[in-house]
Image (cartoon, grey):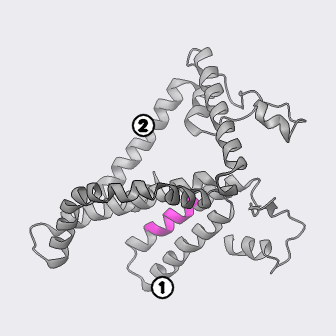
Amino acid sequence: TLAIQVAQGWGWLSGANIELWYWDRFRGWSENPNQLALYCAIFGTLALHLATTTSNRWAKFLAIASVFFTFYVGRLTKSDAYLYTSILTCLTFLGLGIRTWIKTAGNKVSLSRQALLLLLIGSIPMAVSITPYVLSEASTLENFAKSLTKDNGGEATAETAELRLYLWDAALEKGVQSGSMGLGPGPHVNRPPTWERQFDFLTRPFEAHSTVLDLYTQGGAISVLALAWIVGTAVMSAWRAKLDALVALM
């Protein structure tokens, strides 16, 4: 379905009177671009899991293709959160993959294993030695990082950060005011003042845009603890089964 949405978004197929773009951000059939970005984050990691566990060549090929395609669609949404979580997921997956490979190799001595161990041992002094160069090129790296965000790290990124910080602070305050018991289902955060610039007609409460804080304001501390138990159990199960992609997904 993602392929159909992209084809409609670029005008290759009829969009059936569906508004597929939110300004310059792709949202497909979703209500907003961030929702589509969440789907891409989940589906991309599941495709990575399939690519690393299946023995069927065609399934592996399609899974790898799906990883790259979902990342492409996720970047079309211009979601900064998707970009950051994708980078973190990749780093986590690589770290877990190296751990699994070293452990499964056991006491076997191989050239690739020895080279990896030497690289890991030498990574610390190497990092120290290149620190002056990295600091001298800090502005270049900063500009590159900004180029990956929406609006190149300009006003749109600043407004998004301001909005998120306001919502998180307000949600935490609402949860504390309820005695950590929760206020029941539904959004409870007041409309942020930064939002009045574009959507002055919206008066309804807002969500916190954070799963943990939304649970805290609605269900209290017990809901947050329940979520932590569910996620922790799932992570431990995937860890014991050495399903690195699923651990990274968590």
Q: Is residue 221 left or right of residue 130?
A: right
Position of 59 with respect to 119 (left or right) is right
- Circles 1 and 2 in contact, beta carbons < 8 Å: no
- State the residue at coordinates (86%, 76%): 14
Q: Quadrant of residue 55?
A: bottom left
From this viewpoint, is residue 104 visible? no
Alpha carbon distance from label 1 to label 2:
37 Å
Identify the residue at the far bottom of this view: 57
Which residue appears at 72% of the width and 49% of the height? 156
Classify the position of the N terminus by image quarter: bottom right
Q: Where in the figure is residue 213, as x and y percent of width and height?
A: 58, 32
User: On the rendered structure, is 97 left or right of 15?
Assistant: left
Secondary element at tag 1: helix
Q: Look at the magenta stretch and give its main secondary structure.
A: helix
Do we see residue 214 in this rendering? yes
- Where residue 5 sits: x, y (%)? 74, 70
Which three-letter amino acid code belongs to the residue tagged 1?
Trp
- Local packing at callout 1 (Cα closer than 10 Å; few below 14, some 14-19, many 20+) is few
Q: Is 247 placed left or right of 210 in the picture?
A: left
Q: Which residues are magenta?
A: 41-49
Residue drawn at x 61%, y 61% as measured from the top left? 147
* Mark drawn on residue 58: 1
**Which amino acid does the dot numbered 2 rest on?**
Trp
- Residue bearing mark 2: 229
Total numbered labels: 2
- As drawn, 153 above or below 211: below
Foreground residue among 77 and 104? 77
* Residue 119 lies in quadrant: bottom left
The residue positioned 85% from the left and 42% from the top of the image is: 198
